[in-house]
Amino acid sequence: MNSSVQHSQVSPDQLEEILSQAKARAEDHYLEFTGTVTPQHAWLLFQTGQAIIVDVRTLEERKFVGHIENTVHIPWATGISLNRNPRFAKDLESKVGKDKLIFLLCRSGKRSAAAANVAYNVGFESVYNIDQGFEGDLDEHYQRGAFNGWRFHNLPWVQD
């Protein structure tokens, strides 16, 4: 599927409903950020140009596991020990800006929630976590992708 195809905009009422649902989902976390969107809603608003997706996974994860085309990459953590990127908020502001509708994506939705918390607390008012992440949660066999996540929902992605 070609992710560069633009579809009609989501109406203001639909957008308000999606973001209202996202705010309700944020209450499930003990962090402060604007909300948590479903992968499907993230894709809908991204493909219509109404939101920007920022992939906060490592460069290696994007390369070897796959990624969504035309997204911004700002790692929340780097290296095999996943050292937190101290420039994350500054990079987010310089590459995206505080005035955009921003959806953050990681492997399962946990690092992106932490990144959304930091961004929110430095003044990003429209920063949301993408629920379930790219690969989803672990199943009973400690494997990802079996019951949720971006790829599980058959949303567009590519692999290098």
Image (cartoon, helix red, strand yellow):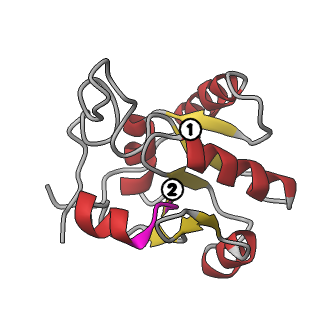
Please state the total of marks drawn on the protein image. 2
Q: Report the amino acid beneath label 2.
A: Gln
Left/right of residue 35 with respect to residue 57 in the rendered view: right
Q: Which residues are magenta?
A: 55-59
Q: Earlier in the sequence, mark 2 or mark 1?
A: 1
The residue that appears at 31% across and 17% down in the rendered structure is: 140
Residue 36, position as x, y percentages in the image = 59, 35
* Mark number, residue 50: 2
Query: In the figure, 100 relative to 87: above or below?
Result: above
Residue 109, position as x, y percentages in the image = 51, 40
Quadrant occupied by the C terminus: bottom left
Residue 61, position as x, y percentages in the image = 35, 62
Task: Answer with the quarter of the image where residue 27 lies.
Answer: top right
Q: Main secondary structure of the magenta part?
A: loop
Query: In the figure, 88 relative to 157: above or below?
Result: below
Residue that extends furthest to the left in the rendered view of this protein: 1
Tell me, yes or no, whether the two marked residues, 2 and 1, touch with CB atoms within 8 Å: yes
Query: In the figure, 18 relative to 81: above or below?
Result: above
Q: Report the amino acid beneath label 1.
A: Leu
Residue hosting label 1 = 15
Task: Answer with the quarter of the image where residue 88 lies.
Answer: bottom right
Q: Secondary structure at mark 2?
A: loop
Residue that extends furthest to the top in the rendered view of this protein: 140
Q: Is residue 57 magenta?
A: yes
Residue 70, position as x, y percentages in the image = 35, 70
Left/right of residue 36 with respect to residue 151 in the rendered view: right
Quadrant occupied by the N terminus: bottom left
The residue that appears at 45% across and 40% down in the rendered structure is: 108
Q: Secondary structure at mark 1?
A: helix
Q: Is residue 101 magenta?
A: no
